[in-house]
Image (cartoon, grey):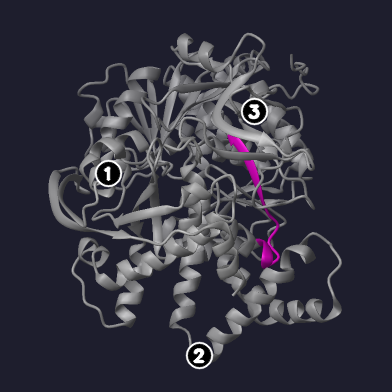
Amino acid sequence: MTEQHAPTGELHSIPALLARNAARFGDRPAYREKEFGIWQSWSWVEAAEEIRALALGLLVLDLKPGDYVAIIGRNRPAHYWGMIAAQMCGAVPVPLYQDAVAEEMTYVLEHCGARFVICGDQEQVDKILEVEETVKGIERIVYTDKRGMRKYDHSRMNALADVQETGRAAATRLGPELDRRIAGLDYDSTCVMLYTSGTTGKPKGVVLSNRNIIETAKNSCEFDHLTEREEIVAYLPMAWVGDFIFSMGQALWAGFTVNCPEGAHTMMTDMREIGPSYFFAPPRVFEGQLTTVMIRMEDAGRFKRWLFHRFVAVARRVGPAILDGQQVGFVDRLAYGLGRLLVYGPLKNTLGYSRIRVGYTAGEAIGPEIFDFYRSLGINLKQLYGQTEASVFITQQPDGQVRSDTVGVPSPGVEVKIGDNGEVFYRSPGTFVEYYKNPGSTASTKDAAGWVATGDAGFFEESTGHLRIIDRAKDVGRMADGSMFAPKYVENKLKFYPNILEAVVLGNGRDYCTAMINIDLNAVGNWAERNNIAYASYQELAGHPQVYATIKAHVEEVNRSVAEDEMLSNCQIHRFLVLHKELDPDDGEMTRTRKVRRAVIGEKFADLVDALYDGSDSIHTQTEVTYEDGRKGRIKATLKIEDVQVFGAAQAQKVAAQ
């Protein structure tokens, strides 16, 4: 069984790390936040004072050890402080997705039994007041932003700044009690409870201890040599384990600076101003940025467009080798240097990637073409494999051993094995304590020896020792002829194209594969405008004949690529349709982290699935949708079904060579 490490000195809790950082790093910036276009900064000493004041204020409001404190809002220093302050009081922070609808919040708030809720603004307060019609037990609401809150009933509602002032006033009286609670925290105290995305059912509350978070943060910081001089941008949902480990665990362990952007609309500007040295983004962020880049290049002049494609071709050929320190010919190195001056440098600066020393992507498999594109620009983008139950890290790619088709070697302190059925198992200091109030699921996921079933299918390459993930174990199946069916492999290739936002590949137990595709409205809409094609809605644009022709060309290119893979060549797509609506978390078709719920889609679009396999040329359908104000409605459409060419291995190689 994995050895249980003893605490490092007295650093056995997040509050203990905070105290260490205030003493060691003092005036170095700990947090920055941009608001109204201006960056405000707090040093470690100042942050420690703000957090202690908040913790004292929560004691005044009678926060008890073992209470659960829900935190809902965008990435702000005050919300990270709220999580640490709750821990100081012996309570458990439970961050929620800020874009969750009231119904989703109801389940989590009821399940964890939160007494206190820290809300970002009026919108989040309104959601809490709405869910209180069914959820009982919420006794105190604390809000960060005072705008719009003046006329609310404040009998059990407080502004966060006011709670801090109350705490400062009570410092002499309650200081000893707070110190006693902080001293009572140990390595096995609960650090945070994070809810899974609920891809296959109700979300589960994953209980993570200080040991889980601190040991994982320590090991991963050492792996990539992260120090107090790193700069990160905290923009991903606070309810997601990745943000917690990067913006809390690693930030507190290494002592680096957490920068909170003003909002999604200022993200690009804020990234350029901060210039993060350590950066994480899920594949959808990199996919979206590449789409934006390609759209802009289509709008550029002929010479600029030629220059871009000319030097991107050079970068694709030699960029990754130069990044890994391999030998490259003088002429190629000279061409790449010129490309860095004219194209790669300005492009990285536009994206805010100029100073990235270590970058990671995870959460979903990233398309190899997308991954290689960013590395070709000289960005040290790597892949990691992890999950909430592991405190993120299961495997990582060491510098110099980065490839698009693997997820690296086991992270420090992590053991990984492959089960008889091909499923990946791991155990580590980061392995979760339990699923809250769910001993059955805990036992079925983690065995008595500490091994956790990931639910993913994969294998270790004999030559490199790197892990390759094929797909979700439950999604990997067999075609009717017995050949392997791995939908994610094909979907990621499709999503490389800027015109394709999402794809769902079908084929388990079938004679052949088919696909349902979402177009990217930004990319395709830009193309329509440039070609003077009028459209009134997503639905109308998605059904346009020229859009279908373009998507068909992309699918056939993917088929050629898939045909070259002997193991998965039967996963080529024979027929497809373009969906009349975007897959949406509000409609239950995706999780909040934008993972496709295949079972929901298979049931909701059963008529479309049948049409893809019964030889129909088109299908009339109607689908329930949720509008932004929460109202339900139905949209009707007649969808065209298109046949596409498939290839043999030799034929695909011949076409590729041409």
Q: Which amino acid does label 2 sit on?
A: Arg
Which contiguous range is marked in magenta?
A: 375-386
Q: What element carries label 1?
A: helix
On the rendered structure, is 102 left or right of 426? left
Q: Is mark 2 on a helix, strand or loop?
A: helix
| Residue picked out by circle 2 | 302
User: Which numbered disc flags the more N-terminal residue, 2 or 1?
Assistant: 2
Distance between the alpha carbons at the discs numbered 3 and 1: 43 Å
Q: Which amino acid does label 3 sit on?
A: Ile
Q: In which quarter of the image is residue 216?
A: top right
Distance between the alpha carbons at the discs numbered 2 and 1: 43 Å
Which mark, residue 213?
3
User: Which numbered disc flags the more N-terminal residue, 3 or 1?
Assistant: 3
| Residue picked out by circle 1 | 609
Q: What residue type is labelled 1?
A: Val
Q: Nearer the viewer, mark 3 or mark 1?
A: 1
Asked if residue 117 lies in the magenta stretch, the reply is: no
Residue 619, given in percent of the width and then of the height, sits at 17, 52
- Residue 496 in sight: no
Residue 362, given in percent of the width and then of the height, sits at 58, 44
Q: Is mark 3 on a helix, strand or loop?
A: helix
